[in-house]
């Protein structure tokens, strides 16, 4: 059984309650809400404090964030031989530093917002490319989105 240490009573200022330890008190913890318990031992049934949900480690937030999602490409198609242009990738969960992965290649990317990133497409680099290439977004933490196809069409197939 884990023993819990209690702190000696001290005078309480008017603007605080005795149940709330201050950061300068021994036993103060920023790791989880607790009922005055200052133990660093996990609660019964848990192998660790993290397993018990008692952590505010910034790594936890990064590893539990959902991956980005790509919902649209604008434009979604280009005609081979057309001039270079900017493609807008729209979706959710993009963060500053996100990179567009166009046809398997990291492209210089402009972060616009959490729902839009852009890159320039140099059409001369895509001559003879597959008719469709996957476009995805990778956030700096390595999380990668789903991919949507970007299509290249033959100039003779214009309608």
Image (tube, helix red, strand yellow):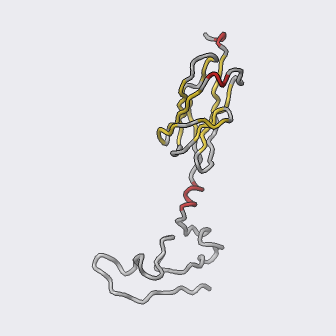
Residue lying at 60% horizontally and 68% vertically, measured from the top left:
50
* Residue drawn where x is 66% and y is 24% of the image: 126
Residue 107 versus residue 3: which sits nearer the camera? 107
Number of marks in picture: 0
Can you say which quadrant of the picture contains the C terminus? top right
As drawn, 116 above or below 19: above
Residue 38 image point, x, y percent: 50, 80
Is 137 drawn above or below residue 151 in the view shown?
below
Q: Position of residue 67 (x, y in %)?
A: 59, 47
Q: Quadrant of residue 54?
A: bottom right
Q: Residue 63 is drawn in which quadrant?
A: bottom right
| Extreme residue toward the bottom, this view | 8
Where does the N terminus fall, quadrant-wise?
bottom right
- x, y percent for residue 124: 64, 22
Q: Nearer the viewer, residue 127 or 155?
A: 127
**Point 47% across, 38% down: residue:** 112
Image check: 74 left or right of 22?
Answer: right
Q: Residue at x 59, y 27 (%)?
A: 121
The spot of residue 103 in percent (x, y) is 67, 32
């Amino acid at each position: 059984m884990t023993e819990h240490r209690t702190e000696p009573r001290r005078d309480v200022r008017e603007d605080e309650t005795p149940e709330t330890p201050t950061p300068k008190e021994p036993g103060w913890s920023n790791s989880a809400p607790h009922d005055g318990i200052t133990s660093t031992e996990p609660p019964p049934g848990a192998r660790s404090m993290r397993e018990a949900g008692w952590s505010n480690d910034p790594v936890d937030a990064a590893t539990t964030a959902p991956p980005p999602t790509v919902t649209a490409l604008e434009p979604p198609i280009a005609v081979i031989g057309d001039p270079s242009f900017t493609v807008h990738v729209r979706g959710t969960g993009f963060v500053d530093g996100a990179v567009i992965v166009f046809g398997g290649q990291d492209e210089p990317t402009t972060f616009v917002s959490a729902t839009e990133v852009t890159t320039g497409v140099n059409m001369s680099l895509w001559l003879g490319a597959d008719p469709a290439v996957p476009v995805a977004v990778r956030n700096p933490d390595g999380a990668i989105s789903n991919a949507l196809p970007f299509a290249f069409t033959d100039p003779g197939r214009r309608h």
